[in-house]
Image (cartoon, rainbow, N blue to C red):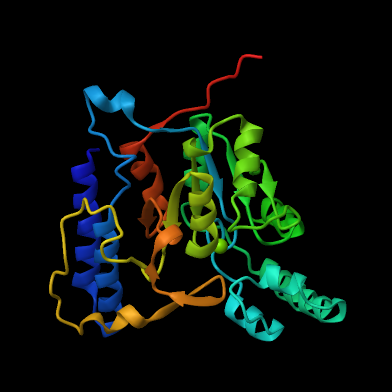
Amino acid sequence: MSVGVSFALQRLVARTSRVSAVTRGVASSARRASRVAMAGPDPRASAPDGPQRAARRRLVGAVFDMDGTLTVPNLDFQEMYRRVGCETKDILSEIETWPEDRRARANAIIHEMEQEALRTMKVMPGAEELAAFFDARGIPRGLVTRNVQSSVAHFHAHAWNLAPFAPALARDFRPYKPAPDALLHISAAWDVHPSEIVMVGDSGKDDVVSGNRAGAITVLLDTAGKWSVATGTGTGTGTGGEDGDGCGGGEEEDETRSDNGRQVSAILEGEMIPTHIVRSLDEIAPLLEAHYDVVAPAPVAR
Ligand SMILES: [Mg+2]
C-alpha cells in the first residue's frame, strides 16, 4: 500500500466517523481523529513502494503494553490515583518516596484494584490476530507493563490463547515506563537494534514516551479517538485542516484526557507524539506492512 493510499484510508476513517456523528461529543472525537490523521506516518518510515522498497526501515520485533492494549481497559486508574492520594503523574514512582506505612497502604489499594481487574480481564479485539501476524513472520513479541508479574501470569494463563510474550517484563523490572530501559533490555535480549522494534500501547505518557526514548517505532492505540497531535508538531506530510463540520471550534484544545489515571493535555506534544496512531489493533498489521519491511531478525553469527 502506498503512503498516499494509507493517508487516504486514514482520512476516510476520519470522514466516516464524522458522518456517523450524532452528538456533539462524537463530532468532537471525529475532529480530533481528523487532526490525528493529519499527523500521518513518520517520514523516516515512509518510502515509496517499488524500486526504493528495499530502503525501507526494517521492523523485526514487537513490544506491547498489557492493560488497555492487549486487554480491554478494566482498571480505573483515576480511581486508583484518587484512593492512593497520588499527586504526581507517576503513582509508582511517587509512592516509592513515601514513608513505609503510607507506602504499604498505597500498595494494598493498588493490589486490591489489580486483583479485582483480573476477574474481568478480556483480550482486546484484534490482539491475537496481530500476535499471529508477527508469529507467522518469525517476529518476536515481548511485553512491558507497569502491572505486577502475577497479573501477566494470569493474562497468559486465563485470557491469552497463543504462545506467551517473551520477555514479559512487569514492574519488578526497574525503572518503569516511561523509562526506555525495559525496551532496551528486550532489544538486547533479541539482539536487535531498538530502532527496529515497534512499541504498541495505549498510553502516550508511558508507552509512547518509553518507545520514543528507546528510538523505537511507536504506535498509540487510541480506541476512543481522544488524542490529537499538536498543530505544527506532526510530520506535516498530511493534507489537511479541519473540514468545517461546524460544531464549535477550538475550545476542546484546553481539554484534558486521562492517561493511565492522570489528567494530561488531550494534545500529544513532544515525546508523547507517536509514529502512528490507530483506533484499533486491526489497523496495525496493514499499517506496518505499508511502511516497513516486516521481517524476522537475522540470525547473529557467533
Ligand atoms: Mg496501558
Most foreground residue, 269 or 6? 269
- Residue that extends furthest to the top in the rendered view of this protein: 301
Q: Position of residue 182 (x, y in %)?
A: 64, 48
Quadrant in which the N terminus is drawn: top left
Give the answer, above or below, for where 263 lies relative to 191: below
Residue 73 is drawn in which quadrant? bottom right
Which quadrant does the C terminus fall into? top right
Spot occupied by residue 224 in the image (x, y as percentages of width and height): 40, 69
Q: Residue at x 76, y 75 (%)?
A: 112
* Residue pictured at 31% horizontal, 48% vertical: 41
Residue at the outermost right position? 101
Depth check: give the residue in front, 130 or 290. 290
Residue 161 makes an appearance in the image: no
**Residue placed at 59% from the left, 71% from the top?**
74
Relative side of 72 to 281, left or right:
right
Residue 54 in the image: state x and y as whole percent.
32, 24
| Left or right of residue 167, residue 192 in this image | left
* Image region (quadrant) for ligand 1: bottom right
